[in-house]
């Protein structure tokens, strides 16, 4: 009887979650298709998308000149999502005009503003197209991450997953650096972060349910390339600790205690 009641409660909760997800998907803003004259002109593009119907306003300087430049480069505005994205690119460029010297785009550096601007526009439009393509394959994709030294590795992130990028750098002098970013970092406790790095233990599914939302753990090298295999967790040798210390540590406090005891022991040996 108790088991039947538990099953009914779980089934009801899951059904409610499905209804919520379905509502979110239904309310997702569909793009307004461009149905103006061809070939496209800046005036036709601006007339096709009423700024009151989309998030971004056409408050940029010389929008006619901006869209003419995009048309000259061969870019086509297919819908209002393209329109929003291309305006966002222009705004990003406006923010960068106050910078001087070297402009960087991933691993490329540019000393000339016009050369950088051309590369920046092409890159950001390419990223937008990758995002659109990922959403067409899976409507649950809400974000796309770009990894690798050149940022060409596309990682679609769905709205039902939490992901963490882990970068562990081990130097010759036994100094270890740990970087952890991504859409799921804020959901991890300090203990979960510690277990991930020092024990190789991945967090449980979000919410603790066996059938709950999953975690995507991406291990990266120094060039932001995804490692083909899960790396070994940080060990004693990586931290320059002797083999007789307890390992793995239970938590950060325990690790700090181990390190302090080793330091004190080394100091005593030096005094002898």
Image (cartoon, rainbow, N blue to C red):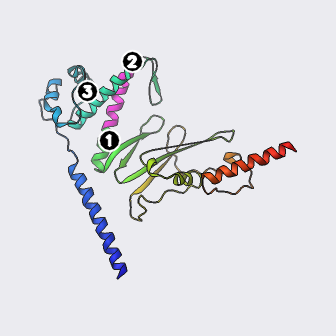
Residue 231 is labelled as: none
Graded by Cα atoms within 10 Å as few (under 14), some (14 to 19) or many (20 or more), the crowding at tag 3 reads few
Res 125 quadrant in image: top left
Chief secondary structure of the magenta span? Answer: helix
Which residue reaches farthest bottom? 1
Residue 247, position in %: x, y? Answer: 67, 57
Label 2 SS: helix
Label 3 SS: loop
Residue 231, position in %: x, y? Answer: 57, 50
Magenta stretch: give its range: 114-128
* Residue linked to disc 3: 74
In the displayed structure, would residue 76 be above or below residue 245?
above
Label 1 SS: helix
**Comes first in the chain, label 2 or label 3:** 3
Camera-near label (1 vs 3) is 1
* Residue linked to disc 1: 131
**Residue at x 12%, y 35% (from the top left corner):** 35
**Comes first in the chain, label 1 or label 2:** 2
Graded by Cα atoms within 10 Å as few (under 14), some (14 to 19) or many (20 or more), the crowding at tag 1 reads many
Camera-near label (2 vs 3) is 2
In the displayed structure, would residue 22 be above or below residue 64?
below
Residue 228, position in %: x, y? Answer: 52, 49
Q: Which quarter of the rendered picture does the C terminus lie within?
A: top right
Q: Is residue 49 magenta?
A: no
Left or right of 102? Residue 33 is left
**Residue at x 16%, y 34% (from the top left corner):** 52
Q: Which quarter of the rendered picture does the N terminus lie within?
A: bottom left
* Residue linked to disc 2: 113
Q: Is residue 128 visible?
A: yes
Q: Spatial distance from mark 1 to mark 2, Cα to Cα?
A: 27 Å
């Amino acid at each position: 009887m108790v088991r039947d009641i538990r099953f009914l409660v779980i089934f009801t909760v899951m059904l409610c979650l499905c209804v919520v997800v379905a509502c979110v998907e239904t309310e997702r803003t569909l793009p307004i298709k461009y149905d103006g004259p061809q070939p496209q002109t800046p005036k036709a593009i601006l007339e096709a998308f009423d700024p009151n119907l989309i998030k971004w306003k056409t408050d940029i300087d010389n929008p006619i000149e901006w869209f003419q430049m995009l048309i000259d480069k061969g870019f086509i505005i297919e819908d209002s999502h393209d329109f929003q994205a291309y305006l966002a690119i222009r705004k990003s460029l406006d923010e960068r005009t106050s910078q001087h010297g070297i402009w960087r785009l991933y691993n490329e550096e540019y000393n000339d503003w016009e050369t950088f601007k051309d590369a920046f526009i092409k890159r950001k439009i390419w990223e937008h197209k990758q995002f659109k393509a990922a959403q067409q394959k899976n409507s649950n994709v809400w974000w796309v991450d770009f990894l690798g030294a050149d940022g060409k590795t596309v990682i679609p992130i769905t709205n039902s997953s939490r992901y963490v990028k882990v970068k562990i750098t081990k130097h010759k002098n036994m100094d270890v650096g740990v970087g952890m970013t991504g859409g799921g970092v804020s959901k991890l406790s300090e203990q979960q972060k510690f277990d991930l790095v020092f024990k190789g233990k991945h967090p449980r599914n979000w919410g603790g349910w066996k059938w709950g939302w999953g975690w995507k753990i991406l291990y990266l090298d120094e060039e932001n390339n995804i490692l083909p295999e899960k790396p070994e967790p940080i060990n004693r040798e990586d931290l320059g600790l002797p083999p007789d210390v307890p390992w793995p540590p239970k938590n950060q406090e325990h690790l700090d205690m181990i390190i302090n005891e080793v330091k004190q022991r080394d100091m005593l040996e030096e005094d002898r």
